[in-house]
Amino acid sequence: MRRALAIGLLSALAAVGAAADTYPQRPITMVVPFAAGGPTDVVARIVAEPMSRALGQQVVIENVTGAGGTTGITRASQATPDGYTIMMGHMGTHGAAPALFKGLKYDPAKSFDPVGLAAGTPIVIVAKKGFPAQDLKGFIEVLKARGPAINQAHAGVGSVSHSTGVLFNSLTGAKPTLVVYRGTGPALNDLMADQVDFMTDQIVNVAPQIAGGTIKAYAIATAERSPSLPDVPTTKEAGLPGYEVSAWNAVFAPKGLPADVRAKLVAALDTALKDPATTKRILELGGTVPKEAEAGPVALQALVEREVARWTPVLRSAVETNP
Ligand code: ASP
């Protein structure tokens, strides 16, 4: 009896080992919780291609939108943790959301096996091309004077554009009308078409349009100017030093991955980010590539915990004054 059990256990272990050894045997789905064409989608597509090469299987993007990114992340967090479903999370879904959703069905720090940071994405304050203000100070004056007549785009409660936008409004006293989109890709289209007035968004979405002059940038919310947008002043230079905020995108898997599968995903992302073509694309769009100490699952877990702790009090009080 004992012998039979032992043999059974051994063959079960062998089966698990074999599955991990041969992973991946079919395409892997990377859930992007926002619309195609936006920053999360762009970063996902930039890293999915070299990750596919490293893994020898296609990493296929699936856009699952809604509720500020929490719909897609909830779904992906509940997938079987076998390495065939991963996701591109960000500062909103894995940092800001717990402050803004009472019934959030995942815990950013506990429901995932972090794979690694993919890109840092500074926040830029952008407006439609014809917005009647020359600089950030003038922009804030117009916002305050026109109140709800100004429309601010965002990608849903808890998203980066929403949380950083609410923070901007609470710091400046602006009270615009908030207009929700399924991602800042579609929001950017409406900004270019003059359908909305402004948003605060991740640089990788807006850098090409700023450079091309189809939208305006009033400031970048980082300590230093971005090499990809050298003419855009920092918020400090432009007179709003309290508004310094940078977002990020990162790859996560549902909690419980077999160790070998996890190691393969971590290695594939690492290889992808060391590919000079990948780095070049991220940098051209104004993003930053994780430094050694920021890369990988341990650093990402620590980042998530820090971000949740940082955003929860800030957003709760900002939302009280600016729902
Ligand atoms: N960056 C956006 C946000 O969270 C969403 C997107 O990636 O489209 O605001």
Image (spheres, helix red, strand yellow):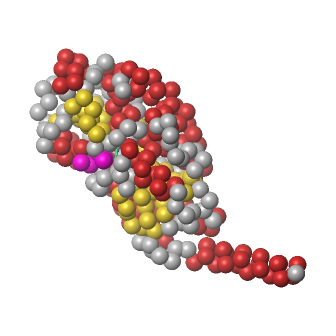
Which one is nearer the viewer's eye here, 135 or 283? 135
The quadrant holding residue 259 is: bottom right
Q: In this picture, is 243 found above or below 180? A: above
Question: Can residue 285 be seen by looking at this rendering?
Answer: no
What residue lies at 37% left-to-right and 61% top-to-bottom? 62
Give coordinates of residue 27: x percent, y percent: 44, 72
Residue under the image location 23 percent in, 18 percent down: 144
| Residue 116 in the image: above or below residue 161 | below
Along the horizontal axis of the image, is 140 left or right of 195? right
Q: Position of residue 277 (x, y in %)?
A: 36, 61
* Residue bounds of the magenta highlight: 182-186
Judged from this view, the residue extending furthest toward the right is: 2
Q: Is residue 237 magenta?
A: no
Asked whether 183 falls inside the magenta stretch, the response is: yes
In the picture, the quarter occupied by the N terminus is bottom right
Which residue occupies 50% across, 67% down? 84
- The answer, for residue 148, to whether it is visible in the render is yes
Q: Nearer the viewer, residue 206 or 16?
A: 16
Residue drawn 33% across the image and 31% down it: 165
Q: Position of residue 256 (x, y in %)?
A: 62, 59
Which quadrant of the render holds ligand 1?
A: top left
Magenta segment main secondary structure: helix
Please tell me in which quadrant of the rendered image residue 123 appears: top left
Please say if 222 is above or below 261. above
In the rendered structure, the answer to whether residue 206 lies left or right of residue 118 reads left
